[in-house]
Amino acid sequence: PLLLTGEPGTGKTQLAFSLAYELNLPPPLVFNTKTTSTAKDLFYRYDTLRHFHDAQFRKGDFAVEAYITYEALGLAILLSIEPSKADTRLPDHLKSKGPTRSVILVDEVDKAPRDLPNDVLNEIETMSFTVEETGQTFSADTSFRPILVLTSNSEKNLPDAFLRRCVFYHIPFPDAERLRLIVQRRLPTTGTFTSDMLENAIRHFEKIRTLPLKKKPATSECLAWLQILQKMSIDPGNLKPGEAEALVFSYAILAKTRDDLALIERSAVTGEVAAT
């Protein structure tokens, strides 16, 4: 597995999509981790209540399989085997797509209970799982072994046994040159928002990041903020009458706490974050 860390908004999730694109694979199968997630949830979910309800109030033979929904890692393993063995368990949009390799994104794995990473060590190593309710075991074809990408915001430490089995990469905040390249690709300049105005805005953002903020704005906040400035044609380095108030109001996109917002606003007034 590839374990990604980095500030929120630096592109951890997007890296998984980029990986799938570069390898000419379908978009990742995504599992959004919750505080209540269990190891089994990565592979499948069994709707016990619906099964019980149908068995009590409807007539017919209600097979357990009909109440099982396969999740990201389970789907990836099923997609790696022959369609004749997997298609009956796959959603319609994935039927007859295999055998193929898949990228699985387990987003914000550090949200899960601490036991979850340790509980899936064997399943991740063997790329196999067993459906407890039916006793069936599914194992990935080694020729189409899924690629597992996990992201973490480092809100809590992951177990050592799990970390030893991961390839680790920390996505740093982009340097000035890289940030400009990202902005240029995502936010082309227009007639009313020139390249000089964009450059002033980027420098203004970089000054804000030097402030002692509790939560520094990341790339995603930068892009959102620049879009606002672009729509309003505001140049932080050459403010026109009446634009100073609008610029200060826009800082709400960059700040994530009341104290940070107040600090940015005070710094703007005193000129600490001036673009020039």
Image: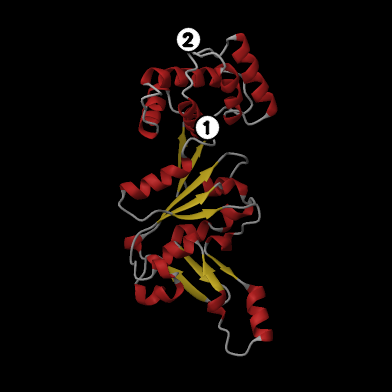
Q: How is the image coloured?
A: secondary structure
Please give the name of the residue rendered at 38% of the width and 27% of the height, measured from the top-left corner: 178
- In the drawing, does residue 184 fall left or right of residue 109? left
Q: How many C-alpha atoms fall within 10 Å of the one at disc 2: few (<14), some, or many (≥20)?
A: few
Q: Earlier in the sequence, mark 1 or mark 2?
A: 1
Q: How many marks?
A: 2
Q: Which type of secondary structure does the marked residue at label 1 adopt?
A: helix
Label 1 – label 2 distance at C-alpha: 21 Å
- Where in the figure is residue 37, as x and y percent of width and height? 62, 57
Quadrant of the rendered structure where residue 153 is?
Answer: top right
- Where in the figure is residue 6, as x and y percent of width and height? 51, 35
User: Against 87, is 266 above or below?
Assistant: above
- The answer to whether one can see residue 164 in this image is no
Q: Which type of secondary structure does the marked residue at label 2 adopt?
A: loop
Give the residue furthest to the front: 241
- In the drawing, does residue 67 fall left or right of residue 17? right
Q: How many C-alpha atoms fall within 10 Å of the one at disc 1: few (<14), some, or many (≥20)?
A: some
Q: Amino acid at mark 2?
A: Thr
Q: Nearer the viewer, residue 170 or 67?
A: 67
- Where in the figure is residue 56, as x and y percent of width and height? 69, 85
Quadrant of the rendered structure where residue 60 is?
Answer: bottom right
User: Against 56, is 80 above or below?
Assistant: above
Q: Amino acid at mark 1?
A: Glu
Q: Nearer the viewer, residue 221 or 16?
A: 221
Please give the name of the residue rendered at 61% of the width and 28% of the height, measured from the top-left corner: 252
- The answer to whether one can see residue 103 in this image is yes
Disc 1 and disc 2 in contact, CB within 8 angstroms: no
Q: Which residue is mark 1?
A: 221
The mark found on residue 276 in the picture is 2
